[in-house]
Amino acid sequence: METVLDANVGTDQTAQLEIWLTRHKGLLFKVVHSYSNSRAEADDLFQELCLQLWKSIPNFSGQCSESTWIYKVALFSAISWTRRETKHRQTEFSDDLDLTLAENAQPDPRLTWLYEQIKSFNAVDRSLCLLMLEGYQYREIADILGITSTHVGVKLNRIKQALSKKREEEFTHGV
Amino acid sequence: MEFEDMQKVWNSQSQQPLYVMDEKAMHKRVNDYQSGVVRMGSIVEIGLVVVALFVAVFYGIEGILADQLYQLPGSAIFLGVAVYVVRTRSSRKAAEGNSDRTVLGDLNLSIRSLEYQIRRQKRFIWWFMAPAFLLILIQALFSEQGKPWYVWLMMAVAGGFGYWLTRWELNAKLLPKLKKLRNLRQLLMADS
């Protein structure tokens, strides 16, 4: 398989990773935020995503767009990621926990709510929800996940219903 | 908030990213992490090949130089062990390139890779411990001077430790990971 990388980096995987991070870090942040429950976890997961992206570079053949490839790698890494022992990590890396990621001070409360709902889904439904919100079509989501478009449709309808229901419940209870 | 509004809220993230990244620190940590993990990924296999080749060469040379031909079967057995590890490693590497590049494809690949490692760990006693025991037995039966008691003790402790290590990795890491990945595949395939 021929690798399609930016012309100016040659076969330097680390340089390519830097380019991808510059272009697509927003995408990675969304995945990290959807799959982690604390700053330490976010930090850990982000590093895991970077590592898996770096490893995936030789396999990128340009058959799909860069962002689709990065989403595919990031989602697989996130759903199969196993949290390390947080207590141990906090002791070991307490000085540099904030070095890699630092949350913005005042996120939109509606966005916070939306992320909370995404986190309430199982690992697979989270990935479907993310792809849907990113504007991918059923066919594209099916290609990324490796399931059929019909299957994607069934799952996404259920997710949309669940989101609407949660929103309705919160309005009903005056939240 | 209707679904369309949720979409608008979602799209607003491009104006205000969720995190800020300290790029220098991140690159350093990723570089450190990469080199460590890449090494760790093959260190067990390479270590086993080196050990098996060392034993094979050592007993082979000693057997020929000291005219102790009874040492040669042990040497051949460990050469076989080295070949076995290299061949299974090559098969695993070849399989790694065969993902269909979808999340499900990667899941299947990871599951196959874990199943391979689990099979190999479960059979460790047969493909590594048994040849080692056979080698010791040959030495004990044919060596004129025999070996001092602490050599036997050392071998027994090393063998026991090796066995414990493989069982620990199997139960604490590989089997739980396999269970998790199978559950994920089940989730992905549900309703299809």
Image (cartoon, helix red, strand yellow):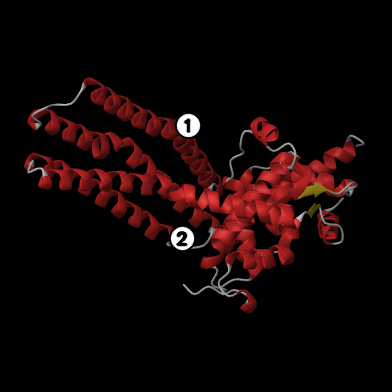
**Rendered image quadrant of residue B157:** top left
Q: Is residue A120 above or below residue A55?
A: above
Give me the chain letter of mark 1.
B
Q: Is residue B192 visible?
A: no
Q: Residue at x 63, y 71 (%)?
A: A65
Percent position of residue B158, x then y: 32, 29
> Tag 1, which secondary structure?
helix
Q: Which residue is mark 1?
A: B172
The residue furthest bottom is A7
What amino acid is labelled 1 in the image? Answer: Ala
Q: Which residue is mark 2?
A: B99
- x, y percentage for residue B112? 41, 49
Q: How many neighbours does mark 1 have within 10 angstroms: few (below 14), some (14-19), or many (20 or more)?
A: few
N-terminal-most mark, 1 or 2? 2
Cα–Cα span, label 1 and label 2: 27 Å
| Residue at 33% in and 36% down | B122
Q: Residue at left 22%, top 20%?
A: B149
